[in-house]
Image: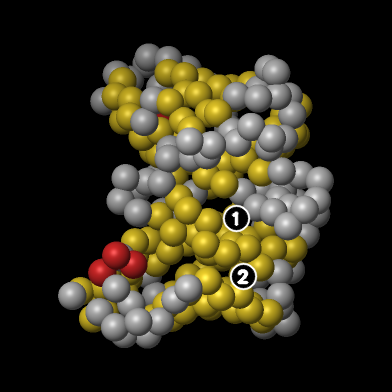
């Protein structure tokens, strides 16, 4: 499968615990995006990377959230001291920046569903 | 900030009916996406367009840049089309997508 993958698909944790999610983009894609989707709503932008550089962060990304893409390939999103309000689907997407017919089209992973008890 | 509004929020139709889902946005954009999300969360990109019209199978997407409006049409709808359809826009000069709240479509046999 050459699509975007995310791990784990589901995570249940207790309030106050730390969690980390991983996203593996399509291999040649240089841009990687994180979104959060709460029940019944459309996704909301969290952050994006071009290669290993984090170029934009949303105000939604509080200081408990950190994202990395150390080698410009996979990315991790960590949430520290989880709160019940963090319960959501965390979606990753990737795109190729730099031309071609798929310029900037984002391809989404299956998401990680987080439940904070 | 771009506001993206979709209508209707929920739509139930019978198999075979012609379906239209609408999307309006408030600020000029560089591209608009139509996405499909099935239960379980996975999102599939259906169309990315910046002008005119695109067609793929039974799906047709149109956009009117002047009116800041796009429509997604499904011809000869089928129960497997049941999903949430999401409109998302990319503002000029930006990279992130701004999403509508989605339209939940149910096609009954």
- A96 w.r.t. A63: above or below: below
SS class, disc 2: strand
Residue at mark 1: chain: B
Q: Quadrant of residue B2?
A: bottom right
Q: Which residue is mark 1?
A: B98
Residue at mark 2: chain: B
Task: Residue at 42% x, 15% y: name it.
Answer: A18
How many labels sit on residues? 2
Q: CA distance from mark 2 to mark 1?
A: 10 Å
Q: Residue B105, position in %: x, y?
A: 33, 69
Q: Residue A2, position in %: x, y?
A: 54, 37
Q: Quadrant of the C terminus of chain A?
A: top left
Task: Residue at 45% x, 50% y: name it.
Answer: B43
Q: Quadrant of residue A113?
A: top left
Q: Considering depth in this image, is A117 or A68 the residue closer to the camera?
A: A68
Tell me the colour scheme of the image: secondary structure
Can residue A83 be seen from the camera position used here? no
Task: Residue at 43% x, 18% y: name it.
Answer: A19
Label disc, if present, on residue B25 of the rendered structure: 2
Q: Residues within 10 Å of mark 1 (few under 14, many from 20)?
A: many
SS class, disc 1: strand
Can residue B105 be seen from the camera position used here? yes
Q: Residue B81, position in %: x, y?
A: 34, 67
**Residue situated furthest left in the rendering:** B109
Q: Considering depth in this image, is A64 or B24 the residue closer to the camera?
A: B24
Task: Residue at 56% x, 75% y: name it.
Answer: B55
Q: Considering depth in this image, is B59 or A15 the residue closer to the camera?
A: B59
Which sits earlier in the primary sequence, circle 2 or circle 1?
Answer: 2
Q: Residue A5, position in %: x, y?
A: 48, 33
Q: Residues within 10 Å of mark 2 (few under 14, many from 20)?
A: many
In contact (CB < 8 Å): disc 2 and disc 1 = yes
């Amino acid at each position: 499968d050459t699509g975007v993958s995310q791990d784990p698909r589901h995570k249940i944790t207790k309030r106050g615990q730390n969690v980390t999610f991983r996203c593996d983009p399509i291999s040649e894609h240089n841009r990687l995006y994180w979104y959060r989707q709460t029940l019944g709503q459309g996704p909301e932008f969290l952050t994006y990377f071009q290669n290993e550089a984090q170029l934009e962060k949303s105000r939604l990304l509080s200081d408990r959230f950190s994202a990395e893409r150390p080698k410009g390939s996979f990315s991790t999103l960590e949430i520290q001291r989880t709160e019940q309000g963090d319960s959501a689907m965390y979606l990753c997407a990737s795109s190729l920046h730099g031309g071609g017919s798929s310029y900037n089209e984002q391809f989404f992973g299956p998401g990680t569903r987080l439940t904070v008890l | 900030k771009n506001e993206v509004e979709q209508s209707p929020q929920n739509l139930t139709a019978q198999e075979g009916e012609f379906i239209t889902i609408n999307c309006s946005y408030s600020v000029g954009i560089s591209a608009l996406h139509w996405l499909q999300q099935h239960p379980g969360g996975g999102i599939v990109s259906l169309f990315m367009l910046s002008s005119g019209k695109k067609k793929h199978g039974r799906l047709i997407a149109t956009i009117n840049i002047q009116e800041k409006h796009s429509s997604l049409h499904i011809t000869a709808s089928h129960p497997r089309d049941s999903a949430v359809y999401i409109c998302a826009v990319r503002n000029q000069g930006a990279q992130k997508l701004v999403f509508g709240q989605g339209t939940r479509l149910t096609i009954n046999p």
